Each structure stands twice: as structure tokens, then as C-alpha cells.
Image: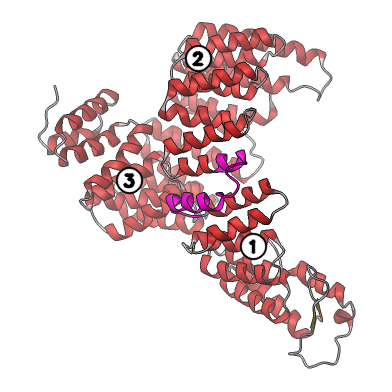
């Protein structure tokens, strides 16, 4: 596979400097490369000798064959020989394609050295230094760049981008704190940056304080008001909502913030307050018919399905009228109607009226949603037990690309799996794997089904292959790592796998549960408690409850453990993991 940026443009650029180099190379020794520095900021003029051309093509071919380290090393050597920053830039891109951060850091530093006035080059060098934990002098360097910049806000944004590469978020906050010290007294943007960094570092109180400081610097800042709402809801929800209403009283036309507040009120279960705010918005802008749809969403979340359906019927009627009166292509009414029907599908499914859900899906005519509607329709036929109709619906789809082909095959297998026909689902996935070899998604689903059947060797082989095909597949790392932890074997490798999964998807509750369970297995009960609580807060499932409860049990917090287990049993009374845990610990719940 080619790497993102070919070196051939550099070849062409060099040739443009010395056109005769292509047709008639000068009679100089093959190992001679002349470099002449032009005005500051311009690349050097380089004679494209046969030797130079050969080395560039060697790098190109190495990269095409996936030998990124060799290609990057050759390009780095070329950059040093020619003093051409373009070659250093290409070396950096190739090293990043190969995920060799140590080599990428070398190339980025060379790039910055050869082109010190290029902010992208300097930023890349600093960012990789930060990601490698090399933060000595970073704060001072960033502070100097901000101080000397004509555009302070842009310099702050670049500093944030660099610091965000650091894995230690508390250290990142400390670096950013020092870097922004000189501008924090006058810049609202600096406080917004510190607010986000504090939140990422697990310091919510500091995050809120910085958001209020940003608002004090710029009372009209919607960005500050959004952070006060978002972060404040996690710390002081009443205060956050009250202050958001105060901001909106002085800025009544801030529709995005109003809608964000509606969303957050709904998320907190304050449905009546959300609807009251929507009512005010509709009075303020009665021609804003999109608010009908939002009001329907809130009612649907509240379980007020009749009200939601009535609002959606009104919304669909209005949008269909728009569709008739507005010239073709000048209205998004077709897409809006389809969105409304998708919400009606959700409501019908919640009411267990699957036939009505199918009827609504069949009425969707937005071309971009047709594939989604048909696959969903097939799933619903499967839930109704009509596997023949489900398969016929999928067979009628004409996939437009490989992605759709993969989705159709995975959907059919999932329908058979959910119908309890695991063997047939496995056969379907094996056939799909033969038709579309090296498709990570198919191999992953096949592996998970084989794991359920206890075929761990086949599962492990498939997960390792998925990781080879898709090195950023957090689920594959997590599944393999968790299996080792559950079996209490290969724990060092399990740790490495789970660390990689956590790096890729740090807030995934399934991964947090796996990491917590690994820490439990290694007797770090306090560490396990931290991760398992974070997982359970997002995913209060019975399996997580089993792990969290057992950790609390080992910490002698027996009443808390019983409460968590009781919650888990209420959610899933037949959960095997939780029932086995209670049996093993000889715990009986009331």
C-alpha cells in the first residue's frame, strides 16, 4: 500500500530546479549532490543526479512494500545530504505511517531544523517530543512562541494541539499551565484551553473555575457558557443550569446553547423543564419547524409516545408540503421526513410493535438512508421469527461497495445468531470470510462466536489476525486481553493488549471493565475499583456489576457489594457471570 504522501512530488520539484537533470545528467561524479541555499524560507536548489534519483525511488518502492522504516531512514539521510526540508517532511510522514514514533521524532526534528520558520514542522517536533514524555523545556518553548506570535489565539491553539499528544494528562495540564501563564490574564481562549485540559486530567473543579474565568474575560463567549454547562452538570448541576439560563437571558438568540441545554435537561430526566424551554423557543421563532422534531424526541425519551407521534405526524405533514412547494434540490425536506420516520421506528420498537416499525422503514425514500432502512427491516423480520423474509430482504439489496457487502453479510449472520442458530451464523461468516478474505470485521465476529462455543484456539488466532489487519481495532485487543484475564493466563500479554485497547478508546466501558478485572486478577483491588466504577457508571450491566461487587467484597465493603449485585440481578436475573460469582462466594441476596 502506498504511504499517504508520495516522494515523487519532491522528485518533480527537484527536477523543476534543474530541468536538464532528467534529460542529460551533468558529467559530475554520481555521488555528488550540489546544494545551494536560496533566500531564507526557500528550499535549496538541488541537482538531481542519477544517484539522488535512485535513492528517492528506492525509498518510494520501500514504502509501497510497507517497509516504512527503511523508506523513512533513506529519506532522512537524503534530507541531511541535500538540506531539503521537503524530504525531511516526507520522511516524517512515512515514519508516522509506519507508527515508529522514535523514528518519527528524529525526522520531525530534522524537518524543524531545516525549516525552522515552518510552524507545522516545529509543532510536529514538539508534539512528538511531548508524546514521548520529553517535556523538558516544552512549557518555556511554547510560552516563547505564544509571546512572540502576532496571532496569539492561533499560537494558543497550536500549543494545545501539541500538549494534547501527551499521554499523562496531569503533566499535560501542568505544561499548559506554565505555557499560558503569560496570556491567561487577558485571554479567554487560554482559560478555555486550561478548562479542557483540567477536565481531561480529572480535575473537574479546576475545569469549572477556568470556564468561569474565560467567561469573565469574555462575557459574550458561547464557548465558555457551553463548558460551564457541560462540565458543571458533572459537579454542580443546579448551579450550571442556573448560570446557563442567566447567560441565555442576556443572549436570547443563542440557539445552539439553548438546544444543548434542552439535550442535557432531557439526559437528566428533566423532561418537563426541557419541554418548557422548547415552548419558549417556539414562541420566539414560530417558523422554526425543526423544534417540532426536537419536541417529539424529548417526548419519546420521556416515554410519552402518543405525544411524540402526534408531533412527528405534524412535522412530516409540514415537511411534505415544503417538498411540494420548493424546487427540486432546494430543500432537505425528503431527508427530514426520513429522519422523522426513523424516530417513529424507534418508538414502534419500544412499544414492541415491530410490524409498524417495518411499515415506517418501508416508507423511507431518502436515497442515503435506503440501505440502512433495508438492513434494519431485515433485522426486524428476524426478531419476528421470519428468517426467510429477513434473508430475502437482504438478498434483494444491491450493495454499491465493499463496505455494504460486508454489512449485509454481518447482518445476516447476526440475525441467525440472535435466533439461536449459532452454527448457521458461523457457517455464514466462514463463507463470507472465504468470499472477502482479510476483512477484519468478519473475522472479528466469527472469532467472537467461536469463543462462545469454547473454541479458544480458533478465537485467539482470529483475534491476532484482526489485530494484524486493523492495528487500531480496540475491540480486538480488548476481547483477546479479557479472555486471557478471564482464564487467568498469559496475564503479562493481557496487560499489554488491554493497555493498547485503552490507548485507542480510553472511555469505552467494556475496556474499562476488562482493565479493572485484570487489576483484580493481579490483586490491585483499589486500582480495579477505580476502573470498574468508571465502567459501571457508563454501563450498569450485570457482568460489570459482578466484577465491581467482587472487588468491593475483597475490600471488605460487603454492603456496597450486595447493593451492586442486587442492581445487577434486577437488570439481568439470569446473568451467568453474576450468578456464578454469588455461588462461588456463597452469597445469598434478599
Mark 3 or mark 1, which is nearer the start of the sequence? 1
- Asked whether the viewer can see residue 407, the reply is yes
Task: Residue under label 3, please give it.
Answer: 514
Mark 3 or mark 2, which is nearer the start of the sequence? 2
Q: Residue furthest left?
A: 586
Which residues fall within the magenta stretch? Answer: 166-193
- Colour setting: secondary structure
Kindly report the distance in space between the C-alpha atoms of the residues bearing marks 1 and 3: 38 Å
Q: Secondary structure at mark 1?
A: helix
Give me the residue at 79% from left, 13% from top: 324
Give me the residue at 56% from left, 32% from top: 394
On screen, residue 39 above or below 204: below
- Magenta region includes residue 413: no
Q: Are marks 1 and 3 in contact (CB under 8 Å)?
A: no
Give me the residue at 82% from left, 17% from top: 326
Kindly report the distance in space between the C-alpha atoms of the residues bearing marks 2 and 3: 34 Å
Which quadrant: the C terminus? top left
Task: Residue under label 1, please give it.
Answer: 122
* Viewer-side label of 1, 3: 1
Task: Residue under label 2, please give it.
Answer: 300
Give me the residue at 47% from left, 42% from top: 198
* Viewer-side label of 2, 1: 1
Kindly report the distance in space between the C-alpha atoms of the residues bearing marks 2 and 1: 51 Å
Nearest to the observer: residue 258 or residue 426: 258
Q: Main secondary structure of the magenta part?
A: helix
- Residue 497 is situated, as x and y percent measured from the top left of the image, at 37, 55
Amino acid at each position: 500500500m502506498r504511504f499517504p504522501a508520495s516522494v515523487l512530488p519532491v522528485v518533480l520539484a527537484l527536477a523543476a530546479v534543474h530541468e536538464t537533470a532528467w534529460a542529460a545528467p551533468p558529467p559530475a561524479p554520481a555521488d555528488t549532490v550540489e546544494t545551494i541555499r536560496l533566500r531564507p524560507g526557500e528550499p535549496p536548489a538541488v541537482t538531481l543526479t542519477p544517484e539522488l534519483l535512485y535513492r528517492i525511488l528506492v525509498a518510494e518502492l520501500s514504502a509501497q512494500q510497507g517497509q516504512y522504516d527503511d523508506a523513512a531512514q533513506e529519506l532522512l539521510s537524503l534530507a541531511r545530504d541535500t538540506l531539503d526540508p521537503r524530504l525531511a517532511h516526507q520522511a516524517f510522514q512515512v515514519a508516522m505511517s509506519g507508527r515508529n514514533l522514535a523514528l518519527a521524532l528524529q525526522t520531525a526534528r530534522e524537518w524543524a531544523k531545516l525549516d525552522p520558520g515552518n510552524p507545522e514542522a516545529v509543532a510536529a517536533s514538539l508534539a512528538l517530543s511531548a508524546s514521548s514524555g520529553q517535556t523538558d523545556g516544552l512549557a518555556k518553548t511554547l510560552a516563547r512562541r505564544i509571546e512572540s506570535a502576532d496571532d496569539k489565539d492561533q499560537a494558543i491553539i497550536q500549543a494545545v494541539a501539541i500538549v494534547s499528544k501527551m499521554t499523562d494528562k496531569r503533566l499535560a495540564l501542568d505544561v499548559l499551565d506554565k505555557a499560558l501563564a503569560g496570556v491567561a490574564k487577558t485571554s479567554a481562549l487560554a482559560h478555555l484551553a486550561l478548562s479542557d485540559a483540567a477536565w481531561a486530567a480529572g480535575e473537574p473543579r479546576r475545569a469549572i473555575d477556568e470556564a468561569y474565568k474565560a467567561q469573565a474575560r469574555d462575557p459574550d463567549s458561547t464557548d465558555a457558557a457551553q463548558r460551564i454547562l457541560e462540565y458543571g452538570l458533572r459537579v454542580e448541576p443546579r448551579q450550571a443550569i442556573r448560570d446557563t439560563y442567566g447567560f441565555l437571558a442576556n443572549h436570547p438568540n443563542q440557539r445552539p446553547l439553548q438546544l444543548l441545554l434542552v439535550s442535557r435537561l432531557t439526559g437528566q430526566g428533566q423532561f418537563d423543564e426541557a419541554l418548557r424551554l422548547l415552548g419558549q423557543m417556539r414562541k420566539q421563532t414560530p417558523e422554526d419547524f425543526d423544534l417540532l422534531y426536537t419536541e417529539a424526541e424529548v417526548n419519546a425519551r420521556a416515554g410519552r409516545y402518543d405525544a411524540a407521534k402526534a408531533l412527528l405526524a405534524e412535522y412530516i405533514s409540514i415537511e411534505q408540503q415544503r417538498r411540494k412547494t420548493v424546487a427540486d434540490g432546494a430543500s432537505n425536506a425528503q431527508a427530514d421526513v426520513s429522519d422523522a420516520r426513523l424516530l417513529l421506528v424507534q418508538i414502534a420498537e419500544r412499544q414492541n410493535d415491530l410490524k409498524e416499525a417495518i411499515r415506517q422503514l418501508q416508507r423511507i425514500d431518502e436515497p442515503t438512508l435506503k440501505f440502512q432502512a433495508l438492513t434494519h427491516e431485515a433485522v426486524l423480520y428476524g426478531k419476528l421469527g421470519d428468517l426467510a423474509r429477513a434473508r430475502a430482504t437482504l438478498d434483494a439489496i444491491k450493495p454499491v461497495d465493499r463496505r455494504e457487502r460486508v454489512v449485509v453479510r454481518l447482518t445476516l449472520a447476526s440475525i441467525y445468531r440472535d435466533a439461536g442458530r449459532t452454527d448457521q451464523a458461523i457457517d455464514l461468516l466462514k463463507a463470507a470470510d472465504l468470499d472477502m478474505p482479510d476483512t477484519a470485521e468478519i473475522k472479528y465476529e466469527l472469532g467472537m462466536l467461536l469463543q462462545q462455543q469454547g473454541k479458544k484456539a480458533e478465537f485467539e488466532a482470529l483475534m491476532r489476525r484482526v489485530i494484524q489487519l486493523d492495528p487500531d481495532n480496540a475491540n480486538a485487543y480488548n476481547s483477546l486481553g479479557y479472555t486471557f484475564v478471564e482464564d487467568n493466563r498469559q496475564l503479562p500479554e493481557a496487560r499489554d493488549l488491554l493497555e493498547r485497547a485503552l490507548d485507542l478508546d480510553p472511555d469505552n466501558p467494556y475496556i474499562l471493565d476488562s482493565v479493572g478485572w485484570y487489576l483484580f486478577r493481579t490483586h490491585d483491588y483499589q486500582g480495579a475499583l477505580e476502573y470498574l466504577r468508571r465502567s459501571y457508571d457508563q454501563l450498569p450491566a450485570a457482568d460489570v456489576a459482578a466484577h465491581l461487587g467482587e472487588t468491593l467484597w475483597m475490600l471488605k465493603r460487603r454492603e456496597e457489594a450486595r447493593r451492586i449485585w442486587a442492581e445487577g440481578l434486577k437488570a439481568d436475573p439470569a446473568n451467568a457471570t453474576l450468578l456464578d460469582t454469588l455461588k462461588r462466594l456463597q452469597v445469598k441476596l434478599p
